[in-house]
């Protein structure tokens, strides 16, 4: 069977790899609204994500109330301060980083794990966290779709899950995973923002690929 039978054409392949390579975790936004049809396309990209046992454990809460958005911002700011304290010597450096764009972005979407996940055994009997992995796949689909549409998206994880779940009236067992900031940007970062700010550098690919067994810590 020829590889070319199923392979995308060169232009489409380049577009896929370009979206992957130019995706950024954005923090800086401009408040112009997003065209409803494009927003729906991004939601549809999440809906198309793979999920363990086809359980589709993601739930998306679009935050349209501005007062509620402000309360969410305050929850994130509270955790930002707690994280800064926990970082000790890096506190000052951390506080100089912009970690969210909740007040500036066009859309705020809370991604959550659904409740009543326990009956879903397929693929989760020994790895129950695969439901969380499935939500991450949905988020990545949204990220790539947003980048293809010229929109920025940022994943905010600085919040107390129990507080946010209570605020959004989530049922028992449901759990917020991410606050997503989505919107137009003046420009995309040339590198991941944390690399640009010298917080941390990406590890070389060859150091992350092992063969046949775990390598490192003295192993060849």
Image (cartoon, helix red, strand yellow):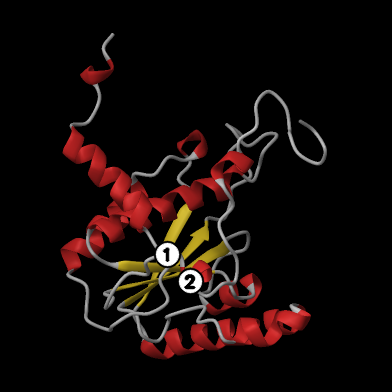
In-front residue for pair 10/176: 10
Relative placement, left or right, of 207 versus 167 is right
Relative placement, left or right, of 204 versus 85 is left
Q: Quadrant of the N terminus?
A: top left
Dot placed on the residue nearer the N-terminal end, 2 or 1: 1
User: Can you identify the residue that label 1 sits on?
Assistant: 191
Percent x, y for residue 16?
28, 44
* Mark 2 in CB contact with mark 1 (< 8 angstroms): yes
Instruction: Say what secondary structure mark 2 lies in.
Output: helix
User: Can you identify the residue that label 2 sits on?
Assistant: 196
Residue at image x 42%, y 80%?
A: 101
User: CA gap, disc 2 to disc 1?
Assistant: 6 Å
Relative placement, left or right, of 53 versus 199 is left
Residue at image x 31%, y 57%?
A: 43
Q: Can see residue 102?
A: yes
Instruction: Say what secondary structure mark 1 lies in.
Output: loop
The quarter of the picture where residue 186 lies is: bottom left
Relative placement, left or right, of 152 versus 172 is left
Percent x, y for residue 172?
62, 63
């Amino acid at each position: 069977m020829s590889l070319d039978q199923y392979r995308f054409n060169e232009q489409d392949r380049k577009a896929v790899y370009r979206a992957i390579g130019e995706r950024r975790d954005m923090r800086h936004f401009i408040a112009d609204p997003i065209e409803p049809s494009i927003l729906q396309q991004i939601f549809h990209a999440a809906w198309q994500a793979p999920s363990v046992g086809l359980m589709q454990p993601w739930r998306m809460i679009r935050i349209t109330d501005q007062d509620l958005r402000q309360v969410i911002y305050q929850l994130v700011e509270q955790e930002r301060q707690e994280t800064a304290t926990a970082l000790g010597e890096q506190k000052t450096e951390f506080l100089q980083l912009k970690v969210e764009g909740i007040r500036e972005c066009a859309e705020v979407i809370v991604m959550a794990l659904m409740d009543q996940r326990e009956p879903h055994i397929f693929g989760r009997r020994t790895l129950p966290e695969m439901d969380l992995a499935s939500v991450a796949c949905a988020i990545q689909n949204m990220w790539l779709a947003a980048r293809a549409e010229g929109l920025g998206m940022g994943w905010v994880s600085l919040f107390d899950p129990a507080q946010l779940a209570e605020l959004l009236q989530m049922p028992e067992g449901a759990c917020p995973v991410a606050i997503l900031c989505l919107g137009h940007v003046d420009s995309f970062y040339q590198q991941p923002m944390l690399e640009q700010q010298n917080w941390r550098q990406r590890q070389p690919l060859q150091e992350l690929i092992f063969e046949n067994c775990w390598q490192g810590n003295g192993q060849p």
